[in-house]
Image: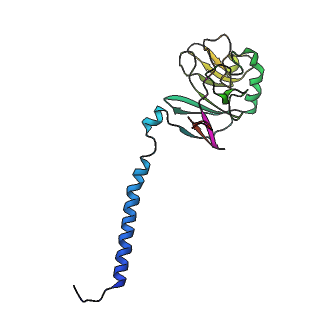
Amino acid sequence: MSNAPVDNGRRRFLTIATSVVGGVGAAGAAVPFIASWNPSERAKSAGAPVEVDISKLEPGQLIRVEWRGKPVWVISRTPKMLEQMKAHEDQLRDPASEEPQQLDSAKNPYRSKRPEIFVAVGICTHLGCSPSFLQGGFGEKVEGTEDGFFCPCHGSKFDMAGRVFQSVPAPLNLEVPPYTFIDDTTIIVGEEEGVA
């Protein structure tokens, strides 16, 4: 062993430098490890919940997201759209959404948790086609109603709550997927409040 004096400043510098390099290395290894906990794209398409940002959704606008390989519509309904829905309830097959495939959250006049925001699976309940959103042009299909969904394949018609009209091939209202609001501008499709 050497009898040379110990340089405490150098020792302190080397200890701190080693700790910093070790910390950066640990963080560098932790980031991909933690990221691997997030569901993969394959898992998301198989049913993992999907987060939807509705902060830029304009009144009357429809946005589409994919959940479980299905198109899901998120629509900001205008007060006029909500008012029109009352005028044609006598023409609907299941106006109160009493068919057993409906979630409890869809069993209200608007079939939604908030009247102005409607969330639905965009697949016709007849043969699985995707209806078109007719904003302002639905009156040609149903008199007195300007907005709705029309399936061009076989002529099924749905109102702005996804309720099916009578005398069309579709037997059921559009499906409302499980969803929850995590704040005023974000929806999670695939999860329902209080359901784990």
15 in relation to 34, above or below: below
> Does residue 56 appear in this view?
no
Q: Is residue 177 left or right of residue 86?
A: left
Q: Is residue 95 left or right of residue 186?
A: right
Q: Residue at x 42, y 54 (%)?
A: 31
Of the pair 144 and 88, the residue shown nearer to us: 88
Which percent across, then down, holds residue 76?
67, 34
Q: Which residues are magenta?
A: 174-184
Of the pair 151 and 22, the residue shown nearer to us: 22
**Does the magenta segment cover residue 58?**
no
Quadrant that contains the C terminus = top right
Which image quadrant for residue 148? top right
Which percent across, then down, holds residue 2?
22, 86
**Does the magenta segment cover residue 177?**
yes
Q: Residue furthest left?
A: 1
Quadrant that contains the N terminus = bottom left
> Does residue 31 appear in this view?
yes
Which percent across, then down, holds residue 154?
57, 12
Colour approach in the figure? rainbow
Which percent across, then down, holds residue 25?
36, 61
Q: Residue at x 63, y 40 (%)?
A: 181
Of the pair 79 and 192, the residue shown nearer to us: 192
* Tag count: 0
144 in relation to 51, above or below: above
Q: Residue at x 37, y 72 (%)?
A: 17
Which image quadrant for residue 100? top right
Q: Is residue 122 left or right of residue 146?
A: left
